[in-house]
Image: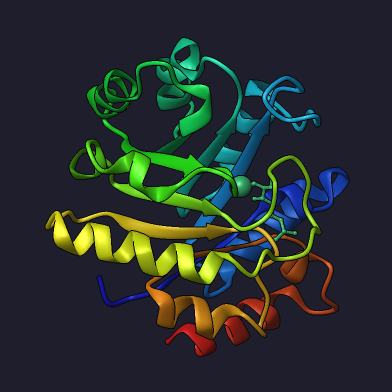
Amino acid sequence: MDKKIIAPSLLAADFANLQRDIEMVNKSEADWFHIDVMDGVFVPNISFGMPVLKAITKHADKTIDVHLMIVDPDRYIKDFAELGANNLTVHYEACTHLHRTLQAIKAEGMTAGVALNPHTNIHLLEDTINDIDLVCVMSVNPGYGGQSFIENTYDKVKALKELINRKKAHTLIEIDGGVNAENAKDLIDAGADVLVAGSFVFNSSNPTQTIKELKEIVG
Ligand code: DX5
Ligand code: ZN
């Protein structure tokens, strides 16, 4: 995959002006919307659920990349498909039967992603990588926006890229957490295909311009 993807995370948007921020992303050079669903159990924080997602997908006109930070995600796969998710990412640490979960996501017509917490080794995906459309490498501990990027991520991305190539898989590598203009190029060089950026985009004075800047960096 040559074209690199920028996915602004709406977690950092202004929820009182969500439609405005969605329109900004629609009109920008961004490729995807990244949407973080947190349950207060798998991660300490609660973000938002179905009614808000429904409102988002009504206005968003780009690929909807949903990142579930919830326990037992199998319960809601059908709901997320019906709400318009295009990619559904579950956490490795939250799935007892990951292979079954991946098949269930694809059966609903979505692409299937697996997110790895910073402590989770990429080699745990040796037996499932050919079934995974996207691996989301968490470069912060999930639960909050605005945290500092974990430097070990570069080595992890390189090892994951090696695994994907060795297994002849067609899996995209997504990086989530603390992405900014400083680390974007190095992450792409390490093997990343998709960069999620929340606070770097929405806390900037000109988010449209910041997205453009990230697009130029990743090429
Ligand atoms: C963290 C979320 C991220 C978050 C990224 O748990 O999965 O998607 O929104 O935010 P920043 O880019 O601010 O680290
Ligand atoms: Zn996320």
Query: Foreground residue, 99 or 62?
Result: 99
Quadrant where the image shows the N terminus: bottom left
Question: Which corner quadrant of the image does residue 99 belong to?
Answer: top left
Can you name the residue that lies furthest to the left here? 168
Can residue 152 be spotted in the picture?
yes
Residue 104 location (% of width, % of height) = 29, 20
Image point (46%, 32%), residue name: 92
Q: Is residue 145 left or right of residue 52?
A: right
Question: Which corner quadrant of the image does residue 107 belong to?
Answer: top left
Query: Foreground residue, 43 or 5?
Result: 43
Image point (68%, 43%), residue name: 142
Can residue 91 be spotted in the picture?
no
Image point (35%, 17%), residue name: 97
Residue 108 location (% of width, % of height) = 29, 23
Residue 39 location (% of width, % of height) = 70, 22
Q: Is residue 188 left or right of residue 30?
A: left
Question: Which corner quadrant of the image does residue 177 belong to?
Answer: bottom right
Residue 37 against residue 26 in the figure, above or below: above
Residue 207 location (% of width, % of height) = 73, 73
Image point (26%, 30%), residue name: 109
Quadrant where the image shows the C terminus: bottom left
Q: Is residue 202 left or right of residue 83?
A: right
Can you name the residue that lies furthest to the top here? 75
Residue 207 against residue 105 in the figure, above or below: below
Q: Is residue 216 left or right of residue 201?
A: left
Query: Foreground residue, 178 or 23?
Result: 178
